[in-house]
Every structure is written in structure tokens, then in C-alpha cells.
Amino acid sequence: MTTSSGRRPGIFAVRDVRSLITETAEEGHGLKKAVGSLHLTAMGVGAIIGTGIFVVIGEGAGVAGPAVILSFVLAAVACAFSALSYAELASSIPVSGSAYTYTYATLGELVAWIIGWDLILEYGVSVAGIAVGWGGNLNAFLDAAFGVSLPDAIATSPEDGGIFNLPAVFIVLAITALLVRGVSESARVNLIMVAVKLLVLTFFIVVALFNFGTGNFQPFAPSGVDGVTSAAAIIFFAYIGFDAVSTGSEEARNPAKDLPLAIIGSLLICTLFYVLTAVGALGIASPDQMKDSDAPLAAALDEGAGITWAAGILSFGAVVAITSVVLVIMYGQTRIFFAMCRDGLLPQRLATVNQRYGTPARLTIGLGVLIAILAALVPLSEIVKLVNIGTLFAFVLVNIGVIVLRRTRPDMPRPYRVPWSPVLPILGVAFAVYLMSDLPLDTWIRFGVWLVLGLAIYLLYGYKNSRLRTEAGSGTPGWARDEGHQS
């Protein structure tokens, strides 16, 4: 069957929003609605607060000096524009897939495939890289707390002189098992971990305030405005993760209310903790004391407040923080992959939901094994840079998606609306493009190679197996009839 214009849907055909939502109720392909605003907000905080605040604050202070406090605020503002756009689309299209699904409903199948393929790489490499970092922080905690550490042969990848990274494999497989077990169980575990890491940061802030001094705040901005903006570009990536909340759209009990609250709320909570931590750190240590340390917060307490035993507490906090990041980011990847499989762009059999657990168990296990192998053996020092460009690319398309959908579907119910559209979404695009332009050429080349590979897979498999075409060809209503947006 062809479309109403007499042609089969083309590569830029879009998905009808009502059809996307209806599809979530299909037997065997619908996810369980099991999480509320508290758990979704905790997912956002869990994804954002990781190694960033425990490490990046030192780098930022080295560039901007005490004005790194302003850099944290500026980076948060840059993220806020995209967060508002995510909130509008997530509440309006409560379907798994995040930026992939939103792009399918606004810019068409080919662009959706590109962003989905991009997100698969971004989330997968991110989880593998974070898992490797988890192993390093675990060793640091064991050393600080008990004076022992794992042998390099089983604690580092071949790139670093080891045989394989056992801790990285362990954490990936453990998180995989938890995600298979259920989203509500995963959300509860994440909530506990978020509470622990916020408690650790609160401990640092309180101790710092009791030992606070103003001597390290002069001069406040030694590198001027350029230093503040340069540090903000570094710190920006400590905020990435709020977008993972939108991947839980389909499993939210009340997506219209819960998703905007969780996306915006998690960003605000993390900004508050980041700024207070930065103020506290500068109140007890100079930028020079922090900038060269792998653990700047522990160095601040040790050298600034004379609390040497705090290193163990902060190392423990870092391990817990990174564990929750692995959990939420891996959860996000499984839901994006699930959405692409359900749409037929990847094998549909992988989109089967386990009736006992209410999760895409087969898909989750397969991705978990692949990521564990990647974390154990593959050099990640260069490929992890692709995470940054992939995230920023998604931000660009989500902001554009808000603008497009406002024009093409003005009457569509929008429980949350971005204020002052299209100004704020345009600012979101501008910030993302600015940061992308600062990335090195080799990162762009790797990104281009990945997209070319993805395009080949789409042309050889995704295009002909897409539900948009197979259902049109079988005589059922097409999925591309979104008021004139068919190719």
C-alpha cells in the first residue's frame, strides 16, 4: 500500500505523534509504567553528578581561578536551554527513544536514524569509559580506606599495560542484571546511590564552610571573561546526563507532569551542589592546590583544612557517584536501542519485552555483554571524545525539533511549553554549535566515519525493514501521515 499521495514513504517521512503513543500499548512491545517524579529526578541527578564534580572542578579552577564559580553557572545556563526543549518534547511525546523519537516526529526518518545511531555510540562508549573510571576510583578507595589495591593485570586494560579490566566488566554486568530485573528496582537502587553521593558532597560543603576563608578569592578572575568562558566549556560536560531522563518517558506514571519536573529539577539540584562545592573548595584551597590533583576535593580538604582522612570518604562518594551514572546512562541506551528496534530500523525481535520483568531483557543482556567487552579490552582514551560531540549534536536536533513541531503541529497538546520559543531553543542550538566548533578535527573525523557506517546500515537494512514502510506495504495505515509531512 502506498501513502495517500500515491507514493511509498520516503527517507524524510515523519512519524505521527498519536501513532507513536499508541504503539507503546502494543502487547509484547510496551514498557511498564513504574516510575514517578522522585525517581525520575534522581535518575537525572544520578546521570549528572559523577566524576565531573570530583575531578573537573580542579581543571576549571586552573583556567578561571576563583571565577570558576561563574563558569559553573554559565555552563548550567547553556544546558538549561536544551533542558527546556527536552522537557517540552518529553511531556508531549511520552515514548522511549528520547532525541531519536523526537526527531522522527519532526525532521523525518533519515535524520532520526542519524541521531539514533549517534546516541547508540554516545551512550555505549560513555558507559564503557565510565566503567573504566569506576575501576580506577574503586582502586583509589581501597587504597585510601584499607591500604590495598587490585593488581594492574586485572585492573587495567591492555592499553594501560594490563590484561583486562575486571572491575569495569563487573560493574557493567552487575548493572545489566539490575536493569533486566526491572525499572522500578533500578530506580530505587539509583535513588539510594544519589542520596549517598549528595550526602558526601554535603559533608564536603559543611566541612569547608567551617574552615572557610576569603584569601583564595583574590584575584577573582585572573584570566578575565575568556577564562570564565573557557572553564565553562570544560565544565559543561559535567552537566551532561539530564537528557537521559527523557529516555524514561514511556515508563513514567504521569509523563506530562513528572518529566518536565525531573529534567529541569535535576539540573537545578546539580547546579546548586556544584556551585556550593566550588565555593567551599575555594574557601579552603587555592586554585593552584587543586588544578594539578586527580582528586581536587580531597586535596582541598587535605591541604586546606588538614583533614587527611577525608580522602577515603570522597573516594567512596566517587565510586557511588560513578555507579549511578553507569546505571542511568546504560538504562538510556537500552531504551533508545529498544525504540529503534520497535520501529524496525534495527531487528524488531530485540524489542520484545520480557513478560515477567517488564523490560527488554534480551536486548539489555546483549548490550551489556558488548559494553563489558569494550570496557575490558578496547582502548578508550580517544574514542570517548565522541561522547561530547554526540551529546551536543543531539542537543541541536532537540532544540530544532521544538521549533519545527510548534509550526507543523501547533494544536498538539503540550503539557509543558518552552517559554519565549523560538528564542530559547535557538539559544540552545547556538550554545551547542559553539561548543562543537571547539572540538578537535580528529573527533569530527571519527564522528563522520561512524555516521557513514550508520548510513550504510540504514540503506541496507533499516530503510526496507522500517515499520513505516512494511506496514504501508501490508495495507495497514502508514506511520508517516503527519499532516502533509511525507516525502
Image (cartoon, helix red, strand yellow):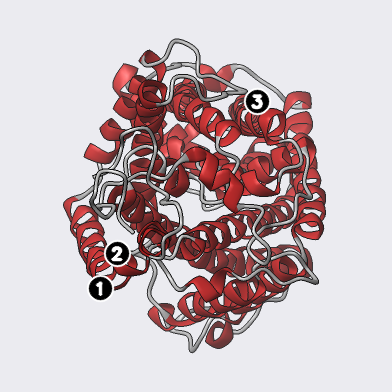
Observer-side mark, 2 or 3, equals: 2
Amino acid on which the number 2 mark rests in the picture: Tyr
Whole-number angstrom distance, CA of label 1 to CA of label 3: 48 Å
Do we see residue 390 in this rendering? yes
Q: Which residue is label 1 attached to?
A: 460
- The reply to whether the C-beta atoms of the residues labelled 2 and 3 are less than 8 Å apart is no
User: Residue extending furthest top?
Assistant: 420
Q: Residue at horizontal 79%, vertical 50%?
A: 34
Q: Secondary structure at mark 1?
A: helix
Of the numbered discs in the image, which one, if any, rests on residue 463? 2
Residue 237 location (% of width, % of height): 45, 42
In this view, 167 is above or below 27: below
State the quadrant of the N terminus.
Answer: bottom left
Q: Secondary structure at mark 2?
A: helix
In this view, 213 is above or below 378: above
Whole-number angstrom distance, CA of label 1 to CA of label 2: 7 Å
Tell me if 106 is positioned left or right of 418 in this view: left
Amino acid on which the number 1 mark rests in the picture: Leu
Q: Residue at horizontal 38%, vertical 33%?
A: 401
- The reply to whether the C-beta atoms of the residues labelled 1 and 2 are less than 8 Å apart is yes
Q: Which residue is label 3 attached to?
A: 272
Total residue callouts: 3
In this view, 11 is above or below 466: above
Tell me if 463 is positioned left or right of 379 in this view: left
Q: Residue at horizontal 39%, vertical 22%?
A: 425
Q: Secondary structure at mark 3?
A: helix
